Image (spheres, rainbow, N blue to C red):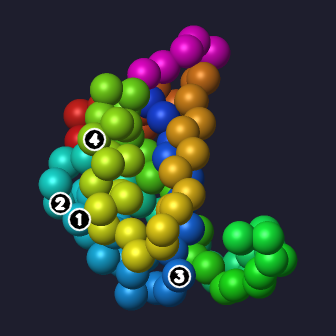
Amino acid sequence: MNQTDTVLVLSNAPDEAVATHIADALVSEGLAACVNIGAPVQSVYRWQGVVEKATEIPLTIKTTASKQANLIERLIALHPYDVPEAIVVPIIGGYAPYLNWVREN
């Protein structure tokens, strides 16, 4: 498989309403081709020295490398967390027609 210019941006939202708002904004503004809103997950993390637990909604965002910086900037602006998760994962290959669709959208 060949390296592509498509990437996944992974994030979480505190609830479904916020997840849907972020997804709608990113897609309608042309920053993402698609956002998958996952089922609630239990997150365990350290925040300000304390181990916390929270139910969160995972977001899997498909975009291109050239749009990722603007997407992350917008994600942070839309997100209620002080430090929202924004992890970029390169897509090293996949079904070419789908990857082309991501690039076009």
Q: Nearer the viewer, residue 81 or 75?
A: 81
What amino acid is labelled 2 in the image?
Answer: Ser
The stretch of residues the image draws in magenta is 1-5
Task: First in sequence, mark 4 or 1: give its number.
Answer: 1
Determine the main secondary structure of the stretch shown in magenta. loop
Residue 46 among those drawn in magenta? no
Q: Does dot 2 land on a helix, a strand or a loop?
A: helix
Marks 3/4: CA–CA distance: 22 Å
Marks 3/1: CA–CA distance: 16 Å
Q: How many marks?
A: 4
Residue indicated by mark 3? 14
What amino acid is labelled 1 in the image?
Answer: Ala
Residue indicated by mark 4? 70
Report x, y in % for residue 56. Answer: 61, 79
Task: First in sequence, mark 4 or 2: give its number.
Answer: 2
The label nearer to you, 3 versus 1, is 3
Marks 4/2: CA–CA distance: 14 Å
Marks 4/1: CA–CA distance: 13 Å
Report the side of 31 relative to 34 (left or right). left
Q: Residue furthest front?
A: 49
Is any atom of residue 32 visible in this view? no
Instruction: Give the residue at x 56% y 29%.
Output: 90
Residue indicated by mark 1? 25
Residue indicated by mark 2? 28
